[in-house]
Amino acid sequence: MAKPAKVLLNVPAIKADFPILQRKVHDRRLVYLDSAATSQKPKQVIDATSDFYARYNANVHRAIYELGEEATREYEGAREKIAAFIRAKSPNEIVFTKSTTESLNVVAYGYGLKGKLQPGDEIVGTVMEHHSNHVPWHFVKDHKGAVLKYVDVTDEGTLRMEQYDELLTKRTKIVTVALCSNVLGTINPVKEIAKRAHEVGAVCVVDAAQAAPHMSIDVQDLDVDFLAFSGHKMLGPTGIGVLYGKPEALEATEPLLGGGEMIREVHLGRASWNDVPYRFEGGTPNIAGAIGLGVAADYLTKLGMDAVRAHEMEITQYALEKFERLQGVKTYGPKDVKKKAGVLAFTIDNAHPHDVASILDVEGICIRSGHHCAQPLMERFDLPATARASFYVYNDLEDVDALVAGIKRVQEVFA
Amino acid sequence: MSATYDLYQELILDHYKHPRNKGPLPGATLNAKDSNPLCGDEVILHLNLDGSHRISEVRFEGQGCAISQASASILTTMLKGLPRAEVEALNQDALLKKLGIPLSVVRLKCALLSHHVLRLAIGDKKADRA
């Protein structure tokens, strides 16, 4: 039976911070259940970005005048906030990129393709990765002759950890894994995987796009070498992402973008690089985005990431119980919320996921349908597509009830 | 059903649940297949022409959302007995008019997949991909 509705966050107060949640869709209350694709933004974040443009817009690290000083201070302040948010040792370990995708490409290119990898060196990934943690490594295979290996998942949707025993060898140079699956919601034992990677002398690269918004991350405790995530999934603006790297890992990484900001000296035909992390931030960065992301991190920190996680565990538990009682509905991924984030992939008998999403849209409910940029995982489960609902700080049990009622409407339509 | 369910009108649901002319057509002279990589919708079309270049037999196979599959089924009902020249002249609007539902840009791709496959089937050599 469903537990009494006891939420750990003050959801009505949180909802009030999100202007978009006040609007209606098709004349209905907006029920936003697609935060795994992108989160909504609180007014604090929206205000911070417009404030930059309205009050102190100037380029960073160059301008001598007051506006430039202010812009640089806020931009570097955001770097400090992000360092604290994931408990990095120093802001110099934080690179601003445009997205998780760019962050992972910086590592694949700069550490893999242009770095110390040799032909025949091995990269171990998993079948549950998002395309953004597959395709950059394909480049390293195709252009460097690296060998790609993959850890499979169990039918429950957890990594088959025992496979690391056979896949990790002296030739393994990179081990890459998502901290949290964007389809199954599985939370992977990254600390253990990093430890195993280090035992064979490999670095551990983590895709934290689905984890950073939803749970407390301590990069020092996890002891990972690189960790990537996006601003827009954690209440921040689009177009800003983060790459964390240990100092020695970043030093061993060649820059992806050449241009302004990332250089120390440029002469005709040659240049030397600026220090880490500026070496990786060629071109004028997304200043407003970084400042907005810093405010998003403030917002989450104020809620408390442990409270955020507990809140989502409660909603996910409630949703799993409700779904279990629905005939003809199947869910994917772990059923134990201790192993699962607030991501719920499901299918409904006789209804294609796109039709499910279309009908829920009429009810004002936003969910994702499709392969979720995880085609290898969909193949593993022999699924062309699934529907996916995902939860965040502004969702409550009522949103789950709306989803369940919507699913019943879908079943009526396709009965 | 509520009036807001414009997309899933009786015609669409009827053709989705009870597709017409569905199945393989071994030895068909014109065949084509295409899919929508975004959704995984797939439609395969098989056509036979008689001596006077009319469509004598038509079948489709496929999987995907109700819009893509109902559209394919409805298209086959429009094709049977049609002279080749009229098949070639059959444009997207004719199919969309028959479907009679409001479509967003994304769902338009679902609805028009079968029409694209028809163009492949009657088009140039590389269209024969089934």
Image (tube, coloured by chain):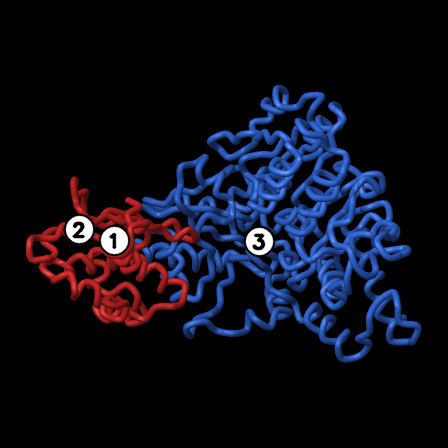
Residue on which the image places disc 1: B121
Label 1 amino acid? Ala
Disc 2 vs disc 1: Cβ atoms closer than 8 Å?
A: yes
Same chain for the residues at labels 2 and 1, yes or no? yes
Q: Say whether residue B127 is left or right of residue A56.
A: left
Q: Colour of chain A?
A: blue
Q: Residue furthest right?
A: A64
* Foreground pick, A242 / B47: B47
Residue depicted at x 66% and y 64% = A237
Q: Is residue B61 above or below residue A33?
A: above
| Residue A308 appearing in the image | no
The hue of chain B in the figure is red
User: As shown in the figure, which amino acid type bears the numbered disc 2?
Assistant: Leu
Residue beneath disc 2 = B47
* Front of the two marks 3 and 2: 2
Label annotation for residue A6:
3
Q: Residue at x 70, y 55 (%)?
A: A241
| Disc number placed over residue A226 in the picture, else none | none
Q: Count the numbered circles shown.
A: 3
Q: Quadrant of residue A220?
A: top right
